[in-house]
Image (tube, helix red, strand yellow):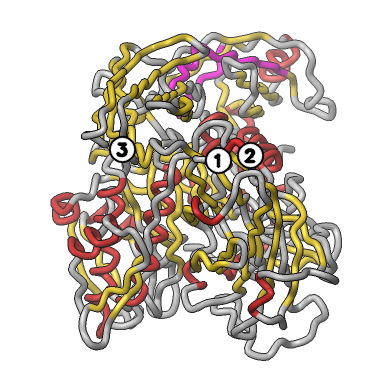
Amino acid sequence: MIVNGNDIITQQLSLEKETEINFDKNHHTILNPARFTPEPEESRLLLDGEWRVKYYPFNEKSVSGPTKNWQTVPQPGKVFYADPEAEGQPIKNWDRVSLSHIAENDGAILRRAIQIPKNWRSKRVFLRFDAVYPAGTFYLNGQKLGTHYSGLTPVEFEVTGMIEAGKTAEVAVRLIRKHKFVKMDMPRHALEFAGLAQSAYFFAVEKTNIREYHLVTGLDKSHRRGKVSGKITLDNPTRGTLLITLSRHNKLAATFRVTTTPSQNCYAVSLEIKNPDLWNDEYPNLYEVKIVLTGHKQQPQIYRYLTGFRRLDLTPKGPKLNGSFIKFRGVNHLTFHPEHGLYTPKEWLRKSLGLMKKANINTIRTHFLSPPALPELCDEMGIYLLQELPIDWGTNYIHDPEWVGPALMRIEGGIRRDRHHPSIMVWSVGNENMPESKAVAAEGWNHLRIYDQFCHRLDPSRPTMFPPPGPANKIKGIFELRFGELADIHYSFALQKQFRAEGRIVNPNSWEGDMVAISREEALKRGWSGCWFSSEYGIFCVEPDMMNSPYLSLIADENIDPLSHKNTLEVFYDRLKTEWGNMRHDPSCLGGAYFPWLCCGIGKGAEGNPWGWTRWGEDANWGVVTADLLPKPQFWALRVLFAPVWFPSRVSWKAGDKYLKFKITNQYNAINLSECVMRTQQNEGGTWMCMVRQFRDVKVSCAPGKTIEVKIPIWCDSLKKALNEGGFGYCRISLLDPKGFCPVKADILIIPESMQQKDGMGMPLGPDAIFK
């Protein structure tokens, strides 16, 4: 059954209510609208706090009536949060992907009563849940509103005629622990979390209100002219004014004003600005867009959001951001809190992202559609975001037309929620989806093609990528460039290197191993940009206590002998240097996302306990930080290798040389090294060589993406003496960026040629070289 993409997309975008679509006698899907009414300023009535809870079994009529003897539970947060193997007992039919071990009707009923403000009389009122995982049926005052079978995207209901201003309203959620489409939302990492994963709230609008706005912030090719343009659509238009302003630091930059009339509900908007301050990871300059709607006999409604001017160009010559070199130094972000599960409070996220910045990470690829707070923080802190749209592990369903509707709902919900954030650089469509067999391959690839088309209908301003499966079974890997502007590869880089060398790749068409070939020219013709990214690589079971376990490295092109006696940190560093180095040095590579930053894990008992017995989402403690945000040893190795400048570990010295000479490449986006401080310290080799106090700064100038030779004077007398007498020493370099942050500190050993010749060693020397 080949679904017509244009037809199904048109139907999805025109929906007003849940609709069943019958493709033929044997195939159907359910479409659900995924639009959200813009929320005016100071109109929210938050439902966060204590909710009453009744666990299964219960009477389904418990959505109303008395709640005597019910427990209470804070929401958002966990209602269920299981460690099924904490006691070491087998669970019948246990399956972390399908949740087959959970009873069909299992779940809970949550209830919360709240007083509706008196001043909401004559207003339109909406009830929104930002995320209920894995699914829920929603009620207001005992009346059913609907069911939402998506645990990561928002759902909204208009409830205007169902509440009364000044009176109490009661909200109920019938929490559903599993459902047919649950595997799309990656329960394998959720550790059976169920509950409100994000906030729920009422909000009110005037009779004439904004139904939708989509304003695209653009930058021209000169990077000197910015524009915010698009459309604003009104409900129940009346005579009034629509005023849009663009400002930075409370200074007005541009204004657009139009008079609204009852006969027109859609208005084109355009604001232009010359020489805007640009947004990137180093300088996340933000502007405020303010929309004020006034209407006849109603209060002005104010809407605000932050935006940034930036331009990502992907071409066969390589990626550019704002016309300059760019490399995404990324990690995968699994949204998870050690106590609250999928509910990650904003300040905890801020701490986590602050630690990322200290590790020289400038990019996140989300694994789970992130909470809405994450793109907000990425906008503010300067982190590029490749946002995943939740269609996970579709091997057994990606071909099935019934799953098309749930996929479209997730794509639309995610894009509509986040498309105004400047930090969102790429829509990452699903994860590791490939048809299960040759017999259904055409249907599966057609659905993925539809999802790509749908993304571009909702947001033409951003590229897409389709993260493929890594090596498994008959499959050696996939270099996925059949869809999206950005090619992607997981774990093995062999195929990508082959493609780079030969200009042609043979990819699997299904899990049965039937293969299809595509050339570089064919991929470019169909819409590939010529650039690639690795959205998962480097997977490593980072148990911080295990320092002599080389077997913790997994899914690598070069496997380590488990009995090699190699130090765990050495294995991690060498592998990351090889894999990240491949991406770092390839001009067509946008970058990569190490898997992952932090692992989903819970401890035995009511609360998580990362210092006690902990069960991990995939039975391995992935991640370079602990669940309570402490850096593991591997954090520091990643920080060194993610530095925007690499320094050599050793340089050769010839008799009479007054300078150390070596080459460096600047991988900042907007910072010339002339804006940085390169602070040097020097000493002779020996027992106390690591202790240095004096320093001298060296001036260098190197534009982003360029390579220069650095000349550092040998100014330390004891170092000069040691070198002239046949000994060795070192130069320590501390690089300080314009804000005073030190992204890297490196020691360069200085080895006389005579010492190398005496020991029979050539340059470069290995990390285990012994000097006698």
**Residue 622 in view (yes/no):** no
Mark 3 vs mark 1, CA separation in Å: 24 Å
The residue lying at 83 percent from left, 80 percent from top is: 87
Residue 357 at x, y = what percent? 61, 34
Classify 10 Å Cα crowding around label 1: few (below 14), some (14-19), many (20 and above).
Answer: some
The residue under label 3 is which amino acid type?
Thr
Can you say whether 354 is above or below 3 in the image? above
* Label disc, if present, on residue 121 of the rendered structure: 1
In the image: residue 306, left or right of residue 16: right
Mark 2 vs mark 1, CA separation in Å: 6 Å
Q: Between disc 3 and disc 2, whose residue precedes?
A: 2
Residue 259 at x, y = what percent? 28, 21
Can you say whether 604 is above or below 744 in the image? below
SS class of the residue under badge 3?
strand
The residue under label 2 is which amino acid type?
Lys
Residue at mark 3: 233
Residues under numbered marks 2 and 1 in contact, where contact means CB atoms less than 8 Å apart: yes
The residue lying at 69 percent from left, 74 percent from top is: 62
SS class of the residue under badge 2?
helix
Residue nearer the viewer, 165 or 579: 165
Q: Is residue 677 magenta?
A: yes
Q: Quadrant of residue 214?
A: top left
The residue under label 1 is which amino acid type?
Arg
In the image: residue 521, left or right of residue 688: left
Can you say whether 620 is above or below 204 in the image? below
